[in-house]
Image (cartoon, rainbow, N blue to C red):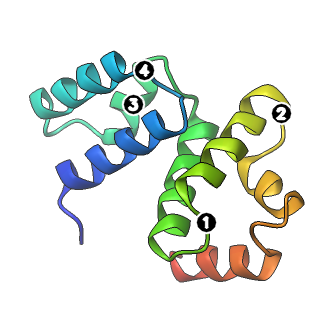
Amino acid sequence: MIPRNLAAFELVELMAAGRLITTEQEHKLAIEIEKAPDEKLDEILIRSGNISAGELESVKLASRLIKEGRIDKLQFAVAISDERSVGIKMEESLIARGWLTEADLKAIKNSTN
């Protein structure tokens, strides 16, 4: 299992890569995570007001997809932008753009359940 802080910082870094937060917000979140080691990571990130619960789930999924080499950070950034601007889920955008197959998505989701 990945230590909480490492996983947290990876998610925050990915949020910045997807332009969900600014560099300044990234630093503020890192400090807040350090100060509240017992608080649930999801609560800290959502409370920041920079990301919704649905977007956070997309970021977590993207993190797994990137680690497995199924997408890259640029593809994530485009797809998460679609989620915010067009209203389709990140995973739907990745499939529609041909960067991810439904089979790949299903395999990732099944491997984490």
User: Which residue carries the number 4 mark?
Assistant: 22
Q: Earlier in the sequence, mark 3 or mark 2?
A: 3
How crowded pointer 1 is (Cα within 10 Å; few <14, some 14-19, many 20+) is rated as some
- Res 81 quadrant in image: top right
Pick whichever, 4 or 79, lies toward us: 79
Q: Residue at x 63, y 39 (%)?
A: 54
User: Which residue carries the number 3 mark?
Assistant: 45
Residue positioned most to the front: 74
Pick whichever, 22 or 92, lies toward us: 22
Mark 1–mark 3 Cα distance, whole angstroms, equals: 23 Å
Mark 3 vs mark 4: in front = 4
Say what amino acid the circle numbered 1 marks. Answer: Ile
Which secondary structure, mark 1? loop
Mark 1–mark 4 Cα distance, whole angstroms, equals: 22 Å
Mark 1–mark 2 Cα distance, whole angstroms, equals: 20 Å
In the image, residue 90 lies at what x, y percent? 72, 49
Q: Earlier in the sequence, mark 2 or mark 4?
A: 4
Q: Earlier in the sequence, mark 1 or mark 4?
A: 4
User: Which residue carries the number 1 mark?
Assistant: 71
Q: Are marks 3 and 4 in contact (CB under 8 Å)?
A: no
How crowded pointer 2 is (Cα within 10 Å; few <14, some 14-19, many 20+) is rated as few
Mark 3–mark 4 Cα distance, whole angstroms, equals: 14 Å
Residue positioned most to the right: 96
Q: Which mark is residue 87?
A: 2
Mark 3–mark 2 Cα distance, whole angstroms, equals: 20 Å
Say what amino acid the circle numbered 4 marks. Answer: Thr
Mark 2–mark 4 Cα distance, whole angstroms, equals: 21 Å
